[in-house]
Amino acid sequence: MTGMRLSVILGAIVAIGVLEPPSALAQRERDGEREQAQSRIDTTFTFSRTGVVDLTQISGDVIVTAWERGEARVRAYTERGRVRSNLSSSRISVNVERVRGRVGDSRFEVSVPVGVRVIARSTSGDVSVRGTRGQVDARSTSGDVEVTDATERVLLESVSGDVRASQLTGEVRIESVSGTIEARDVTGDVRAETTSGDVSLTRATSKSVYVATVSGEVEYEGNIDAGGRYEFRAHSGDVRLEIPENSSAQFSVQTYSGSLDTEFPLTLQPGQRTSQRPRRFEFTLGGGSARVTAESFSGDIVLTRRARSSR
C-alpha cells in the first residue's frame, strides 16, 4: 500500500508539472506584474530642459505643468488597456494601448523642467499645459484645451470644446470647430478661428492678426502696430475692437444688416453711400500706416478707445 500511495503521489506531481510547470508559473506571474506596471506609471528621472514631451490619450485628461527642477515626473494610469511609455533624459513618450479593443478612463500628469517642448493630444478629454515657456502643440477632439506661458510656436486646437490661453509669445494659431476661444496677454502673430463660438483676444501686442467666427462674436483689445495687418470677420455676430486712441490705420468696414458704432471721429471717403447694402465704410485714423479690415454679415462693427490702464 505504501508503494501504491507513493506512486499515486508521484503521478499527481508529474501531472501538476505537465499542467503548470514551474517555469510557466513563474512566467505567468511575471506577465501579471508587467501588465500591472503597464496600467500605471509613477516615476521621476533626470530630464533635459531642451527635451521633448509627447503625450497621446484616447479617453482621459492630459495635464502638464512646469517646475524649476532638472527632472521629470510621469504619473499615468488607465482603467483598461496598457500605458506604453518610452522614457529617456531627452524625450518622454506616453500613450495608451487598447486591450481587446477596449480602453477605460485614463489620466496623464507630467511635471517637466521649464523650457521643454510639449506635444499633448487627447481624443476624449481635456488638455492642460502650464508654465513650460516653450513650444506647445495641444489638441483635443472632444474636450477643452488650456495653455499658459508658452513661446515660439504655439498650436492649440479643439474640435468640440473651448480653447483658453494666456501669456503666449511667438507664432500663435488657435482653432475650434464648436467652442469659444479666449486668449489674453498674447505677443506675436495670431490666427484664431472657430465655426460656432465667440473669439476673444485681449491685451494683445501684434503686427499680424486674423480672427474669424461663423456663429459668434469677435472681440479684440490690443495695439495697432505701424505697418501691421489686422483682419476680423464674423458672419452672425458683432465685431468689437478696442484700440489705442492714437492708432494709425486705414480701415475697411463692412456689414450687411448691422451698423458702425465708433468713438473715433471719422471722415468717410468721398462718394461713399452707406445706405446701400452691404454697408461699406472706408476711413483713416492718424497717418493710416496699418491696415484694418472688419466685416460682419448680421452684426454691428463697434470701435472704442482703449483705456491706458488696460495694459
Image (cartoon, grey):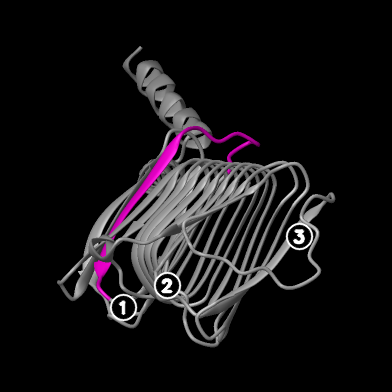
Image quadrant of residue 101? top right
Q: Amino acid at mark 1?
A: Ser
Assign a secondary structure to mark 2.
Answer: loop
Viewer-proximal residue among 184 and 268: 268
Magenta span contains residue 101: yes
**Between residues 289 and 82, which one lies in front from this camera angle?**
289
First reached walking from the N terminus: tag 1 or tag 3: 1
Q: In the figure, is residue 298 to the left or right of 7?
A: right
Closest to the camera, between mark 3 and mark 2, is 3
What secondary structure is marked by label 3? strand
Q: Compute the Cα span from label 3 to label 2.
A: 24 Å
Callout in the foreground (2, 1)? 2
Please say if the residues under marks 2 and 1 sit with CB atoms less than 8 Å apart. Answer: no
Name the residue carrying label 2.
223
Which residue is denoted by mark 3 in the rendering?
280
Span highlighted in magenta in the image: 98-114
| Residue 246 % position (x, y) | 40, 76
Along the viewing direction, whichever of 273 and 170 lies nearer the viewer: 273
User: Residue 74's image quarter?
Assistant: bottom left
**Residue 259 percent across, percent down from the top left:** 66, 46
At a point 44% along the width and 41% down the height, the residue shown is 28
| 179 lies above or below 181 | above
